[in-house]
Image (spheres, helix red, strand yellow):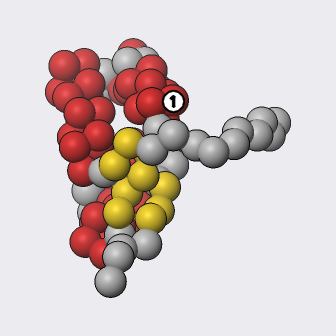
Amino acid sequence: MSRKVVVIDTNCWISADFFPNGIPARAVRIALEHYTIAYSKDTIDELEDVLSRSKFDRFAPLEERLSFTGSVAASGRLMEPSYQFHAC
């Protein structure tokens, strides 16, 4: 039986990383255990861009935050979206 595929929002990844006991972290752990995590190049680029912001300096050094991006990529599967839409 193949696993269902889910996408995790950038904000959820960031909250899970900085607050490992929070609800987003629990959701990520469940997703990693039971589902295939899908991400696109744009998703990883956005995560890296957001984690590069100085407002996150108080949580972890920049290098550590950026290495988290690699962890996210390693935990899932790169997929190209079949369509894109823009919502404001």
Q: Residue at x 77, y 36 (%)?
A: 86
> Which of these two is toward me, 88 or 35?
35
Relative to 11, say whether 35 is above or below: below
Relative to 2, say whether 53 is above or below: above
- Kindly tell me whether residue 47 is visible in this rendering: no
Q: Which residue is drawn at 25% across and 71% down?
A: 33
**Residue 63: image x %, image y %?**
19, 19
Label 1: few (<14), some or many (≥20) within 10 Å? few
**Residue 31: image x %, image y %?**
35, 67
Q: Which residue is drawn at 63% across and 45% down?
A: 82
Name the amino acid, label 1.
Asp
In the picture, the quarter occupied by the N terminus is bottom left
**Residue 56: image x %, image y %?**
36, 26
Q: Name the residue under label 1.
A: 42
> Which of these two is toward me, 21 or 46?
46
- Kindly tell me whether residue 35 is visible in this rendering: yes
Relative to 28, say whether 47 is above or below: above
